[in-house]
Amino acid sequence: MQVTETLSEGLKREYKIVVTADAIEERMSIRLGELAKEVKMPGFRPGKVPVTLLRKTYGKQVLGEILEQTVNESTSQALAEREIQPALQPKIEITQFEEDADLEYTVEVEVMPEIKPMDFSTLKLERLVADVADDEVDKRLDAMAEQFREFNPIEDDDHAAEVGDVVQIDFKGSIDGVEFEGGAGEDFDLRLGSGQFIPGFEEQLYGHKKGSETIVKVAFPDDYQAADLAGKEAEFSVTVKDVKTAADAIVDDSLAEKLGMENLEALKNAIKEQTEGEYGQYSRARLKRVLLDQLDEAHVFDVPGGMVDAEFDQIWAQLEKDLENQNQTLESLDKTEDEAREEYRGLAERRVRLGLLLSEVGRASELEVSAEEVNRAIMEQARQFPGQEQQVFEFFQSNPEAQAQVRAPILEDKVVDYIVEMAAVTDTKVTLDELMRDPDEESEAAAEEEKKPAKKKAPAKKKASTEEKAPAKKKAPAKKKAPAKKKAPAKKEAAKDDDAAEDVKEA
């Protein structure tokens, strides 16, 4: 085998590899000899089939096997001898492969960069922490009491429904006189003023009494999830079967007992503990953001272009999906496609660099993810699909790639904790609003203040990266689902924040 390096530029390497015809023929003869012991052909005893006949019958098939085997083995050998660790699968192009001729092919490969982690003890990090105020616990208690509030039928049939009352209704919807799927329901309890239905529906039931019938006319929003209903005018025939009024929402021991707690004090303590856990997650997320920004600034090394391309493709595909789901365009984000591509390619490069860095730190510090930790994470995901837990678990068990996606964030968290332990971390007390504030907005506000000549301030902080955000920066209005049978005619789906994009992936 002859190996000639034809390109060495940055992380890119290219080699020309030649395997002699004699070496190919030797492999060919060995394989045909093996076939002679296995193949059965009419007129010949087992193991007595002439090699010439086998070559004529199976020559092309065997030659293809030899090509694949030779290319794989010679490529691995060439890279191993040069101590090259490929970042991605090498690209191979056969330039010559004919019978009785040398095999010639080229190998293009990007190598993993040399990564030298900084001294993490020099890092200075600020961790924002917020105490759980008593009024926050009280607010959550009030919300629970509201949720478990009882609604009692009103004996006075002349009572006109008002905000806060619950009307029990039957409804049937139609567009241009034609009923549509999911537009009907019976005995549905709708609390007026809850915003449970699309705008305009609940307001038209104010003032109605038990036993009254009415026609509610509404327009489905233009961004309604069901495309066949979006933007269309609809009519709902509604019968008010009952009007109920809300009893007082009382926070006492009986509320705690309904929630499985011994008494109100125990419920308060449980709420405070849960809230502290939530604040702790917010605090950790902010600290991680600061850490990753500092690591990104402190580590400058080339990253494999192929890995950046793959990461960018994923980000761009997610962006397009988000824009489609939110009925937005790049223009609505106030940027051109070229500007967006430049921004998200920078994000892709940052993600790859941080991923490689954290992966190297995890390797060097011998951090590992146990099978028990992976199984626990899988079971947590399985619980999100009640009744299908076993199928979800079996999917992950039989899918190594899916397991890797579960393992990656666990390892990432371990590496982050490892680095934070060595860094100098200062806790700073802040309010909940300050803890929850978007770091990007803070940076932009600081930059705007810096532009004002009347005031002198410290330089604006570098704008934090967008890893913790979904690609589409402008949040769309809450989406509405098409009405389902025996449900509200136009029930709004609560807007969900998009999951934050992962900063790094397991390399």
Image (cartoon, rainbow, N blue to C red):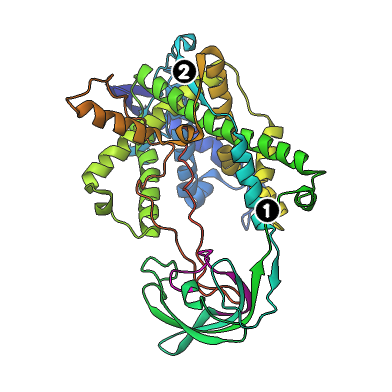
Q: Position of residue 87 (x, y in %)?
A: 42, 29
Mark 2 residue type: Leu
The one of 33 and 427 positioned closer to us in this rendering: 427
Stretch of the chain drawn in magenta: 184-201
* Disc 1: which residue: 145
Residue 439 in view (yes/no): yes
Q: Is residue 199 covered in magenta? A: yes
Q: Which mark is residue 125?
A: 2
Is residue 193 found left or right of 476 in the rendered image?
right
Among the 4 quarters of the image, the one containing residue 329: bottom left
Disc 2 or 1, which lies upstream in sequence? 2
Q: Quick check: 78 above or below 479?
A: above
Q: Is residue 187 above or below residue 389?
A: below
Query: How far apart are the two marked residues, 2 and 1, measured between alpha carbons?
Result: 40 Å
For the point 49% across and 27% down, the residue is 430
**Which residue occupies the foreground of this view, 227 or 489?**
489
Quadrant in which the N terminus is drawn? top left
Q: Which mark lies nearer to you, 2 or 1?
A: 1
Tell which residue pokes out farthest to the right in this image.
262
Is disc 1 surrounded by few (<14), some (14 to 19) or many (20+) residues within 10 Å?
some
In-front residue for pair 245/174? 245
Residue 222: x and y in percent read: 36, 68
Q: Check if residue 482 falls in the magenta segment.
A: no
Going by the numbered disc 1, the residue's amino acid type is Ala
Q: Is residue 498 left or right of residue 240?
A: left
Residue shown at the point (41%, 20%) measured from the top left: 295
